[in-house]
Amino acid sequence: MSVSPVLQTLRTATAEIHTAIETEADVERRLRDLDERPALVARFHVLHSAVEAAVAPWRKHFEAGGYDPDRRSLLILAGLEALGVPTPPGEPVVGLPTYGEAIGWVYVAEGSMLGGRVMQKAMVRDGIPLTGLEFLDPWGDETGSRWHAFMRVMHSACASGRATPEDVLKGGRDAFDLAFRLLVPPAR
């Protein structure tokens, strides 16, 4: 499958913040650490709840294209309960004015699932207990087909004019900014 121009532009435009999150948030190390895990899982709940709330008005557009946006917040909430952590307060979310921005937000959430799958496999291999981490790989072997379904929706929306690449980029940047703010620990 060739990479669509929208995806390539989105990857390029968000590469710096994506890399910053990967290096500065140190997610896998913090999830492996049983003392740090609960606080980070709580931050993931805030992030995914915000994404779900932001894209909710656009859900029918995604579904019409054959893709059901992920709703991991309930899995993360179950993980918090397993860890004995109360539900954290939510993040205020501004409504997304365009379908393209919603696509950008979903790109960030859906992409995090790809990374979560890799982290979970590594933790299983290393014998790390997975309590509270079921949300990392909720779709199992279906993860790749979900990603491809999302790619088709993004490409189709941009090709048909229902979304603009500029709006997708704005949504992706905004969602990555939120992820950075929530997942990267403040400098000490």
Image: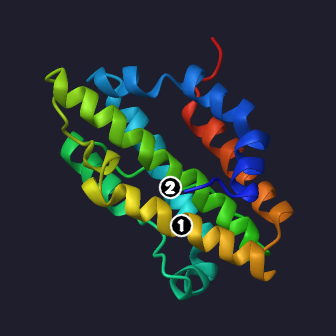
Q: Which residue is mark 1?
A: 150
Task: Count residues near mark 2 (Cα–Cα under 10 Å), then give few for <14, some for 14-19, many for 20+.
Answer: some
In this rendering, the answer to whether 86 lies above or below 38 is: below
> Is residue 173 among the parts visible in the rendering?
no
Kind of residue at disc 2: Glu
- Disc 2 + disc 1, Cβ < 8 Å: yes
Q: Residue furthest front?
A: 1
In this rendering, the answer to whether 74 lies above or below 36 is: below
Q: Quadrant of the N terminus?
A: bottom right
Which label sits in the foreground, 2 or 1? 1
> Is residue 17 among the parts visible in the rendering?
yes
Q: Quadrant of the C terminus?
A: top right
Where on the picture, by quarter, is residue 184?
A: top right
Q: Residue 79: give x, y in percent of width and height.
A: 26, 48
Q: Residue at x 53, y 54 (%)?
A: 109
Where on the picture, by quarter, is residue 6?
A: bottom right
Q: Residue 41: give x, y in percent of width and height.
A: 38, 40
Where on the picture, by quarter, is residue 35?
A: top left
Residue 110 badge: 2
Secondary structure state at the residue bearing disc 2: helix
Q: Residue 117: give x, y in percent of width and height.
A: 34, 42
Q: Residue furthest right?
A: 166
Q: Please give left or right for residue 103 compared with residue 6 in the image.
A: left
Q: Residue at x 75, y 70 (%)?
A: 100
In the image shown, does 30 or 158 lie closer to the viewer? Answer: 158
Kind of residue at disc 1: Phe
